[in-house]
């Protein structure tokens, strides 16, 4: 039973490492190249590749660190842990940038507006 679990954890750790070191950079490169505008047109063709790269770039280290830690593989646990910390840092910086550059709230009426033909929309009026 222990050999089977060790074999499966080795396979999962290897697949996570290959995905993290080869697939994620490939998807990022594909998305980066597809995002360049062709003949002055706006293109969002690379968004799907970049979305997959982001999800795999965060998910594979998470799976890898859990499986490596449960399999007592210290070196792989450190590797995937560092990759996970980097993925969280990049996601956090992106989130902070989105919050900082969020559009301002639309301004509401700053004064009392009266309508002809009946009442007004003044507070307490």
Image (cartoon, rainbow, N blue to C red):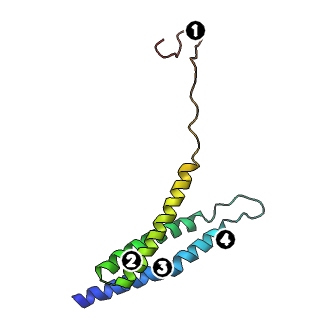
Task: Tell whether label 3 touches label 2 (CB within 8 Å).
Answer: no
Is residue 2 left or right of 23 when viewed as pictured? left
Spot the residue most to the bottom.
3
The residue carrying mark 4 is: 33
- What residue is shown at x 29% (from left), y 79% (from top)? 70
| Residue nearer the viewer, 49 or 102 | 102
Q: Quadrant of residue 64?
A: bottom left
Instruction: Residue at 58% x, 17% y: name it.
Output: 113
- Whether label 2 touches label 1, CB < 8 Å: no
Dot 4 alpha-carbon crowd within 10 angstroms: few under 14, some 14 to 19, many 20 or more: few
The residue carrying mark 1 is 117
User: Measuring 35% from the left and 86% from the top, which residue is drawn there?
Assistant: 10
Q: Dot 1, how many residues are within 10 Å of its Cα: few (below 14), some (14-19), or many (20+)?
A: few
Between the C-alphas of marks 1 and 4, the distance is 61 Å
Image quarter where the N terminus lies is: bottom left
CA separation in Å, label 2 and label 3? 10 Å
- Is mark 1 in CB contact (under 8 Å) with mark 3? no
Q: Which residue is mark 3?
A: 19
Q: Position of residue 20 (x, y in %)?
A: 48, 78
Q: Could you tell which of marks 4 and 3 lies nearer the N-terminus?
A: 3
Label 2 belongs to which residue?
A: 64
């Amino acid at each position: 039973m222990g050999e089977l679990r060790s074999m499966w954890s080795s396979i999962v750790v290897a697949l996570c490492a290959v995905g993290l070191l080869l697939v994620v950079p490939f998807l990022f490169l594909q998305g980066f190249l597809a995002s360049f505008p062709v003949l002055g047109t706006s293109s969002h063709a690379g968004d799907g590749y970049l979305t997959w790269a982001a999800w795999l770039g965060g998910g594979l280290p998470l799976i890898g660190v859990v499986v490596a830690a449960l399999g007592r593989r210290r070196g792989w646990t450190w590797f995937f842990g560092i990759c996970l910390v980097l993925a969280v840092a990049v996601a956090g910086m992106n989130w902070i940038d989105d919050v900082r550059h969020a559009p301002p709230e639309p301004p509401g009426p700053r004064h009392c507006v009266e309508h002809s033909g009946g009442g007004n929309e003044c507070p307490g009026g």
